[in-house]
Image (cartoon, helix red, strand yellow):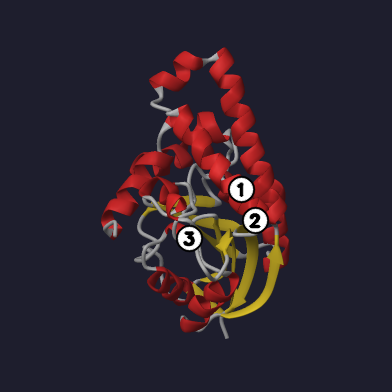
Amino acid sequence: MTAPEEIKSCCTAAYGQDAVALVLGESYHPGGLALTRRLADVVGLRSGNRVADIASGLGTTACTLASEYDVTVDGVDLGESTVERARTAAEIAGLSGKVRFHLGDAERLPLPDNMFGALVCECAFCTFPDKAAAAAEFARVLRSGGRVGFTDVTVVETGLPDELTTLGAWVACIADARSVRTYIEILAGAGLRTVRTETHDDALARMIDQIEARVGVLRMTAADRLTEAGVDTDAVLRYTALARLAVTDGLLGYALFIAEKP
């Protein structure tokens, strides 16, 4: 088994590199901003809400929620350079007064108790080594009646082929994904009652298509950029092929979850 700290370090380093932007483009999760807006709608964001964005990355979701839903957002991410880039993005967008970013671990959130009306987490919960601890932190920072909304990769109860359980697959948000039932149980263990689930497998399939197409174009037009960024295109395409097969076979999916704190 890979040590939790190694997993966190590897994920943080990978998602802080330009290589990720080259391969994934602007959106680092299936469904892009369209699914972000769907998540915001069903979690019930209202003007004036205070929202936590866990694993906030470059701040795209936080800035979108602040500007389109008139909420204030506290983003938390484990990557120091990623947090700095997110702060810069918020400042450029004129949102510094509505969006703040904090360096921190999802399993030990640097946020106060009972403060947030909503919490969102996109395609990241599956990468947290201690999911129960993260769920307990979600519950701690939410006010009574507050809601968690997250989207994530799902797997069947029997798990994945060995090829999709490596450290590289973990970084790619696949290796430690859980079944819908297991996610619900983890949330319940933290006192969060799931009130809605939606299947969005098509978003995962589209993202695989987009990654393969993007890598193919870059191979032909900007191979030197890929090399400089340290992108192993053969490895990327090997993982996407395995992931595509898993989606086709019904082993991998993507889902939206809404859970409420009593």
How far apart in space, not on screen, are marks 3 and 2 (Cα)?
A: 20 Å
Q: Residues within 10 Å of mark 1 (few under 14, many from 20)?
A: some
Frontmost residue, 61 versus 235: 235
In the displayed structure, 166 sits above or below 251; it is: above
On the image, the x and y values in percent for residue 49 come to: 62, 65
The answer to whether marks 2 and 1 mark residues whose Cβ atoms lie closer than 8 Å is yes
Q: Amino acid at mark 1?
A: Leu
Frontmost residue, 155 versus 43: 155
**Visible in this render: residue 9?**
yes
Judging by the rendered image, the residue that carries numbered circle 3 is 126
Q: Give the quadrant of residue 147.
A: bottom right
Q: Amino acid at mark 2?
A: Asp
Q: Tell me which residue sits at (67%, 47%) in the image.
A: 205
Judging by the rendered image, the residue that carries numbered circle 1 is 245
How far apart in space, not on screen, are marks 2 and 1 (Cα)?
A: 6 Å
On the image, the x and y values in percent for residue 96 come to: 52, 45
Q: Residues within 10 Å of mark 2 (few under 14, many from 20)?
A: few
Q: Tell me which residue sits at (53%, 15%) in the image.
A: 222
Q: Amino acid at mark 3?
A: Cys
On the image, the x and y values in percent for residue 234 come to: 47, 29
In the picture, measured across the screen, residue 204 lies left or right of residue 158, that is right
On the image, the x and y values in percent for residue 160 come to: 50, 59
Q: Give the quadrant of residue 230.
A: top left
Judging by the rendered image, the residue that carries numbered circle 2 is 249
**Visible in this render: residue 67?**
no
Q: Secondary structure at mark 3?
A: helix
* Tag in front: 1 or 3: 1
Q: Secondary structure at mark 2?
A: loop
Task: Name the quarter where the N terminus is drawn.
Answer: bottom left
